[in-house]
Amino acid sequence: MLRASRAMLAMRHPLDAELAFSELLGSWWGERMPGVDVGRLLGEGLIAHATASGKPAGLGVLAAVAALGTSSEQRELAGQGVIALQERGLQVPGWASQLGAVTPVAAYVNSDQFGDTDDVVCVFSRDGDRAPDAGPPPAEHALILVLDHNGGGVLRDAWVTTKVDRLLDRCRERADADEFARFSQVELTEARALLTRALERTERMVAGASADRSSGPTVEPIGLTVSDLTGGSLASHFALASARVRTLPGPHPGAGAPQAPVWRRDRRAVLAARFLASDEAAELSDSYAASRCADHIIAHGCDVDSGRPTRISPRKVESFLLHWLPGRVVLLPEEQEAMPHVLAAWVRWAGARGGLPDVAVGATLDAVWESTAEFARVYRDPARPLGLRQEAVRRLLPDGDFASLARRMFAFPLLASEMVTWAPEEFDPDTPHGRRALLRLDHYGEYEAATPHSGRHSSGRDRWYRPVTGDDPERERELDRHERLARRLWHGRPANLWAAARRMLDRGVARPAVLAALGEVLDTATCESDLRRRLDSL
């Protein structure tokens, strides 16, 4: 890398150097090794090697990482390296002092009425955007970032152009000529909030972690793989994009940062009730199945589509039917049969509610019916290969969140057994009492048949259980520790917790040892960020 950076010393404009070094830093973006933070290993290793080199090429690398590094720790370490080499008499290249020194000018969003993607155009200028003896530089440049809302709001592409006026003119001409196109200017603070969320979601996907439910809406990258993001121009522009977004102004003093819409359970229920009471839903024969299907449609729109459950498009319904539902939700047979019909009714209702043209609603309905046969072929009951009955699925997935099945079975394996079917209220994992009962039975088998209660006999499916009172303080402390861990695993907070457990299980570590290691980390972590760091190191 240092040898490659020598050629960059001859560059004359800061933008050229920024693009070159961003590509250099993106060369390992998304690379994975079990138990190793590749970005940290190579990034900090590059900084240490460049500092020790004592050469102008090393100073150039350090100046670039100080401006474009994707973590604050790397930028700080690189800045210290720059100071150390300058104290040894090395001269920084002419462009190095201008890296990252830009002024945001304006931000625009280019899209269409379907809203599947947004092209966010950020325009920047740079005072003194030229090196000594260089020709006249471009006055402005634009960074274009493509947000994919069907993919969970991640970035799909990025590029830079110096032909800003031509780009903006073409976008305006398209919006004027095509009533379906949309092009508008947005506040710089709004652009920063939008792009910051997109960058964070993209980094989480590349790092292999889904969104943490405790920090807002769940993000599910649907139909995407890491190679879809790291294999194109996004990787080579990601460091530059992160640096540019940091230069955008934050909210004004006294004003909160713009937040993504938050759809609480009661608000989702109201939306579902309005749909089910509409004329479009009147012909749905099975009201219970229709209600369950509507809940899944709303959850997809709220959690994946940036809090926009009523946005419809052909791409969105295909993503929902063919990717999100098969990999995310357990549907009962009657719900599988009803889903395309409920979705078609939702398209008609949401399209009218959003003022979408009839031709757009028709195209979306066509996509629903064209996907129905493929949905029936692709969707299979995902619990069947695991040998689970529907009763066990309902206990483990009261929210229908199939993505949580494996970690919930790991946390409470007895929920998948027939042992606790006779007293579901007693063994409810959503209550502290139920969790304690499950864990005591799992750890020590300390449940025994009680005397018949309320006329019930003590055999068969009417058998009752009562807990054995624990009097061993050490065992009670162990149960406390496991209960804290099991509660986090049940809700998936943080996502790093289950990822760490999977890594250990893949290495052949037994479940008790995995539980002990995770519990130790939970006990010793000083804060949530420290917890995530410790989990990533397991």
Image (cartoon, rainbow, N blue to C red):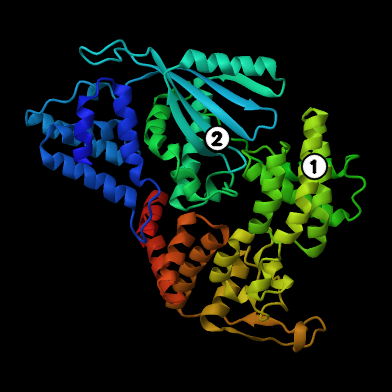
At label 1, which amino acid type do we have? Asp
Q: Quadrant of residue 338?
A: bottom right
- Residue ID at (73%, 47%): 297
Neighbor class of circle 1 (other Cα within 10 Å; few <14, some 14-19, many 20+) is: some
Image side of residue 19 versus residue 200, left or right: left
Of the pair 173 and 526, the residue shown nearer to us: 173
Image side of residue 132 versus residue 265, left or right: left
Q: Which residue reaches farthest left?
A: 88
Question: In terms of secondary structure, where does tag 2 sit?
Answer: strand
x, y percent for residue 470:
52, 79
Q: Is residue 270 visible?
A: no
- Residue ID at (65%, 18%): 175
Image side of residue 276 versus residue 29, left or right: right
Of the pair 20 and 147, the residue shown nearer to us: 20
- Residue ID at (78%, 37%): 363
Image side of residue 233 versus residue 2, left or right: right
Q: Which circle marks residue 147 in the picture?
A: 2
Of the pair 173 and 354, the residue shown nearer to us: 173
At label 2, which amino acid type do we have? Leu
Of the pair 257 and 153, the residue shown nearer to us: 153
- Viewer-nearest of discs 1 and 2: 1
- Residue ID at (62%, 36%): 261
x, y percent for residue 161:
43, 22
Residue under numbered circle 1? 366
- Gap between marks 1 and 2 measured at Cα: 25 Å
x, y percent for residue 210:
52, 51
Nearer-N-terminus badge (1/2): 2
Neighbor class of circle 2 (other Cα within 10 Å; few <14, some 14-19, many 20+) is: many
**Quadrant that contains the C terminus:** bottom left
